[in-house]
Image: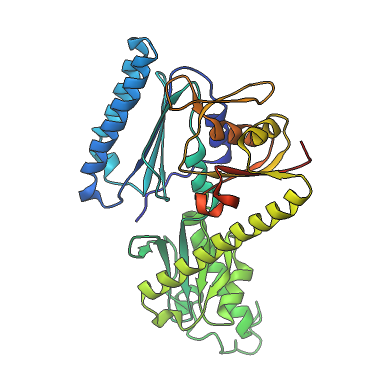
Amino acid sequence: MLHIDLPSRTEIEQIAAYRGTPAVSLYLRTTPVTQDAQADRIELKNLLKTAVAQLAAAGVDKRRVWPIEAAVNAIIDDDAFWAVQANSLAIFVTDERVRTFRLPNQLVNTVEVSDRFHIKPLLRSVSFPHHAYVLVIGVGAVRLLEVSADLPPHAVAVPGLPRDFSNALGRRSHVTKDAPGHSGEAASEYALLSRYARVVDQALRGILKGENAPLFVAATEPMASIFRNASSYPHVATQVIAGAANETPDHVLADAARRALDEIYAAEVARLAALFATREKEGRASTDVAQAARAATYGAVDTLLVDMDNTVSGTVDEASGAVSFDAAPDAVNYGVVDEIARRVLQSGGRVVAARKADIPRQADLAAILRYPV
């Protein structure tokens, strides 16, 4: 099971708005397999050494560096923390505070030291879904599975979830009629299955509260449509895993969910690429970093696609958006594209962290503008 701490929009905005030296951002690819986590701890120690070296080269007072070392070393030494991981770990640390997020996507190991945090890889976790839930529901049984990209499906224990239709409603069949004169809800098949769906939905609320992963329904009709209509969860997927789900092995359901996740990702990438092409003809789109920086500074970027893995080092002028590029990262400069993303967020725009292959022209970024700049 993946143990995920997804950042909220408010948390992302707080991290993006931080200014102060030193600010250290560490991204580490991790394994959710506890017995294999020792290698991740060693790699985090190496990333910390790189960060400390950059701070020393920049002349940062050792009294401000020591708390950063202590905070990260405390994480490295915490056995309980490493027992519950996901696919990547993000750490944002200053000499006063440390924040961690366990993320579902696989990130590149990264060290960034500056007067602001590096947020692009973090945005990947909220750009597209990386894990999903599958509700397997039929008259004879109901269960919830969690599906990730590279682990076997995991059965989720849901307090209050009924075993089946009979357990939920206290009756043997969804087609039998109530006795003549019995008051209450009509005993049509649709009404009974709707009552069943509402009981299941109520039990799921505690588990899915605060989640944004898709929930796929694995069921035959009409049960699939009835549950999707009754569900209070805002991220029920339009795709249904059809068939006699109660008799389908979990690994088959998981494979179907992964294919559906890929379809969701591909459809959104294609939509953004088509929008970029349309806006470019109108002078309202660009893959030029310098132009995107100016547009972001003026609040003109509506949607920004960024390469989540690559870092373009330099600085961006606070007032004009003019870009100065550097050959290598240090404790003074920062990721230029990361700074552009920060400004887009601050002006209410959307930032999508993607792989380079999914960005128009495989550029470092692609900006879709509100108006020409």
Q: Is residue 148 left or right of residue 352?
A: left
Classify the position of the N terminus by image quarter: bottom left
Position of residue 221 relative to residue 49, above or below, is below
Total label count?
0
Residue 89's image quarter? Answer: top left
- Residue 94 in the image, given as x and y percentages of width and height: 42, 22
- Residue 17 in the image, given as x and y percentages of width and height: 57, 27
Classify the position of the C terminus by image quarter: top right
Give the residue displayed 22% in from the left and 42% down from the top. Answer: 39
- Nearest the viewer among 47 and 41 is 47
Position of residue 63 relative to residue 143, above or below, is above
- Residue 10 in the image, given as x and y percentages of width and height: 58, 36
Can residue 231 be seen in the rendering of this structure? yes
Position of residue 126 relative to residue 226, above or below, is above
Q: Is residue 330 left or right of residue 372?
A: left
Residue 74's image quarter? Answer: top left
- Nearest the viewer among 279 and 13 is 279
- Nearest the viewer among 343 and 169 is 343
Residue 284's image quarter? Answer: top right
Give the residue displayed 54% in from the left and 34% down from the top. Answer: 338
Give the residue displayed 39% in from the left and 18% down from the top. Answer: 95
- Residue 113 in the image, given as x and y percentages of width and height: 42, 25
Position of residue 51 relative to residue 357, above or below, is above
Can residue 194 be seen in the rendering of this structure? no
Q: Is residue 299 left or right of residue 201?
A: right
What sort of colour scheme is used for the picture? rainbow
Give the residue displayed 49% in from the left and 44% down from the top. Answer: 308
